[in-house]
Image (cartoon, rainbow, N blue to C red):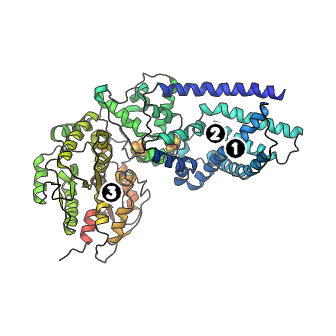
Amino acid sequence: MQTVAFWILLLIFLGAFAAQVARRVQLVAAAPNTFSLDRLGFRAGRFLLDVVLQRQTIRERPFTGLMHAFVFWGFVAFGGYTTVEFLYGLGIVDLTGARWFHAYRIALTPFAVAVLAGILYLLVRRAVVRPVALGPKLSIESMVIALFIATLMITFLLTFRLVEGSTAAHVNWWVHAVVILVFMALIPASKHLHLVLSPITVFLKSPELGNLPNLDFEKEQVGLETVKDLGSKSVLDAFTCVECGRCQVNCPAWGAGKELNPKTIVLQTQDALLAGDRGRKLGEVYSEKVLWQCTTCGACENQCPVGIEHLPILIGSRRGLVSNGDAPDYLGAMYNNLERRSNIWGLGYDQRTKFVQSAALETFDPARHDVLVWLGCAGSFDADFQKSLRSLFGILRAKDVKFGVLSKERCTGDPAKRTGNEYMYQELATGNIEDLKAAGPKTILTSCPHCVKTIGDDYKKFGYEVEIVHSSVYVEELLRSATASAEREVVTFHDPCYLGRYAGKVDEPRALLTRFGADIKEPERNRENPFCCGAGGGLLFADKEEEPGSRISDVRFKQLQATGANTVVTACPFCSIMLKGAQASAQADTQFVDLMTFVNGKLTKPS
Ligand code: SF4
Ligand code: SF4
């Protein structure tokens, strides 16, 4: 009788589970395939760290993350126990009396206590503490699931107290089993689907932050226009979101009071998919205004514990808008500059030539030069940043490094790519690749972190591979045995997103600063998780007066000011422009100095 009842219940709840899962599987299968399995070794290592060891979950919120990890590890540890009890309940085989099962049950006891402690902590956090990241609405579903998990652990622990075969033990067994069945049926329609999907999404997440495969124009690809264009990884991501809000609290746009919230983007994707309106425009699903507020800093997908990638959706949707002529006006002006003059400011090429001549730069020749210095738009045309480059040249010459530049450079195409103008990006990129191939450098050196990302990662998608190094990394190695003036100075260092987060280069700038007399006062949001300056994703050109909320650069400038250091060291031309603008608005007397200028000023040169 008990067996029949259990079979009936299992089939009902399994049916409910399967029907909901099938709907989601259908949606993933119908989406254009964007799954990729390159760099399997890297993916396996990350799986071990982020799924098995829960690194990402624990890293940002150590205590809460550990509590969550207890629940996860317990979930895995109880897999065998649940299987044995279900086999018994279904009358298939009774292994519950086996010695190994007894030992296994005892080994599960500390897991049960840890899961109970973890889930009660998470329940109190959600219901009483209510952090902003979790949203203003109390999720009843989460409360119910937490109570279910607590019930499972309590009923398991009671099996050690209750007399085998007694009515109480019988009732306890049924409560445990029915809670599992109901839990199973609730999972697919809730955020707890991440229990099943997150190992897959973490494994499938691109090894490259902000990975944006090229559009293939021959296949008439134009980016994401409607719900049906969302790629299979984005669809799977939408059903995996655990709504933890880590992306939200780390997003500089959200932090500065703008409408963009990366968590909302993922949940809107989920709602749009389940609503079944595959022809709905993504500009309506998310709102066009919101799509243009992203700086492409990468904080959202870098912080997400379940491998969700926001940038393919955000920039993919921008591509769809641009292909329909729906870019904001300020981008239209920048695109014009890129089209006519191949640089973001639309300045005449003679200005770069003048700088190249005045700095006595030679045209790169692989037979005579060790490295090719890539100037970038800022290095070619921004007088302020050219001072920094002159410092870099001074250091290279002091160490007898032979270097040259291209006789002609275009913008790498970074602002075109990140704002969704893929056609323009590909025009610029292929032209540069042709010139670089003809010049034949083995190593490219640049002071622009955006150029590092674009030439280093994006150009690979055209088959062009070259070592490209940011000046902070190159010079740190070059000057390991250099002597510096002895005086010390208190500074703070602003990690550029494309250097600290994208390239993971956080130790080299600090090593250089410390070696050359700086006592560094770290700002909040530093190293691999900096707060953006607000320039990325084409927002350098946005109309600041029309932006909702505060300016991202103002928020960052205040964080830097709060360190008490009067000198801010930067290592990216765009961070420098944005933060100096914020300093001017605040009428503060903070000094800004580029890393290369700081080092060159302190370097004891041979007389
Ligand atoms: S990339 Fe940065 S600005 Fe854009 S949504 Fe993510 S966190 Fe926000
Ligand atoms: S997208 Fe990732 S980080 Fe953001 S709320 Fe969902 S699970 Fe959390």
Residue 553 is left or right of residue 130, and the answer is left
Type of amino acid under label 1: Phe
Is the residue under label 1 in contact with that under label 3 (CB below 8 Å)?
Answer: no
Q: In front: mark 2 or mark 1?
A: 1
CA distance separating discs 3 and 2: 44 Å
CA distance separating discs 2 and 1: 20 Å
Q: Nearer the viewer, residue 397 or 512?
A: 397
Image coordinates of residue 241 in percent, x first then y, are 53, 38
Residue at left offset 32%, top offset 60%: 473
Q: In front: mark 3 or mark 2?
A: 2
Image coordinates of residue 124 in percent, x first then y, are 66, 48
Q: Quadrant of the C terminus?
A: bottom left
Q: Which residue is mark 1?
A: 78
Residue 538 visible? The answer is no
Q: Which residue is mark 3?
A: 586
Residue 257: quadrant of the picture: top left
Q: Which residue is mark 2?
A: 142
Label 1 secondary element: loop
Q: Nearer the viewer, residue 320 or 261?
A: 320
Residue 258 is left or right of residue 369, and the answer is right
